[in-house]
Image (tube, rainbow, N blue to C red):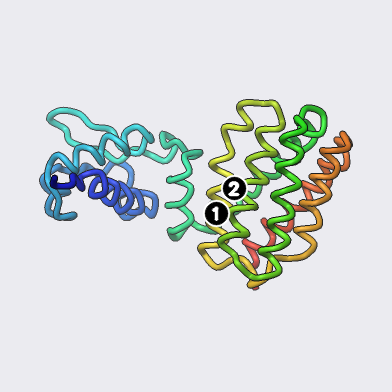
Amino acid sequence: MVRDNRAGLHGSVVDRLGVQITSGECPAGEVLRIEQLEARFGVSRSVVREAIRVLESMGMVTSRRRVGITVAPRSCWNLFDPQIVGWRLDGPGRDEQLRELGELRRGLEPVAAHLAALRATPAQCGMLTGAVMQMAVHGKSGDLEAYLDADILFHRTLLEASGNEMMGALSGVVAAVLAGRTHHHLMPAHPEPAAIRWHAEVAQSVQAGDAGAAERAMRDIVDEATHAMLDPG
């Protein structure tokens, strides 16, 4: 049986075209032709059309008969889509994206921690504690990928433990920020011990139902991460 690799091909086109749009290489208002994209990426018309459908679902392009594919202004994009977050972090506007994400996290995660202290289930408290333990182990060994997995688990669990489904829906954005910090070499070889301690304080405060302490510790986490990414030196 011959394997159908179109999904991989259209995913590659989505990534490459997404980076070109978010970087401004393909500016808002530019009209893209199917045949031009076929030649640019060396793929079939069906692959290009699949990729365009994905980008259209993100609000990045519009497609009209007799007009073609038009790059949409940033105001139309789904800026909370984790792929768009990642593409912007890969481009020349990284500092602006990091600043915006830091501001978003500061307005979101301390409040989520406060609510989690009031609403978290015993199972969620256990997951937070377990994630912190894994962060401590992998932080000491310098395994940044394993540390990242534990960190993402912690923050996703916290947002879900807030009991607010809209906050929980933003876990993908936070995960994209955390992954971007690691993959763009904005993390130290061994994570900041204070950051791990603050994560432990959040977990303990949520477990104890101390909403104020959970909120303060989470604000410390977000402030440290934002400062480290914007001023890695």
Q: How many marks?
A: 2
Where residue 64 sits, quadrant-wise, is top left
Give the residue displayed 26% in from the left and 41% down from the top: 51
Which amino acid type is marked by label 2? Glu
Q: Is residue 224 left or right of residue 99?
A: right
Give the residue displayed 65% in from the left and 66% down from the top: 231
Q: Is residue 175 left or right of residue 36?
A: right
Front residue of 82/162: it is: 162
Q: Which residue is mark 1?
A: 96
User: Dot 1: what SS?
Assistant: helix
Which amino acid type is marked by label 1? Glu
Q: Does the CB distance between marks 2 and 1 fall below 8 Å?
A: yes
Q: Which residue is mark 2?
A: 100
User: Dot 2: what SS?
Assistant: helix
Q: Position of residue 22 (x, y in %)?
A: 39, 50
Disc 2/disc 1 C-alpha distance (Å): 6 Å
Give the residue displayed 58% in from the left and 53% down from the top: 149
What's the mark number on residue 150?
none
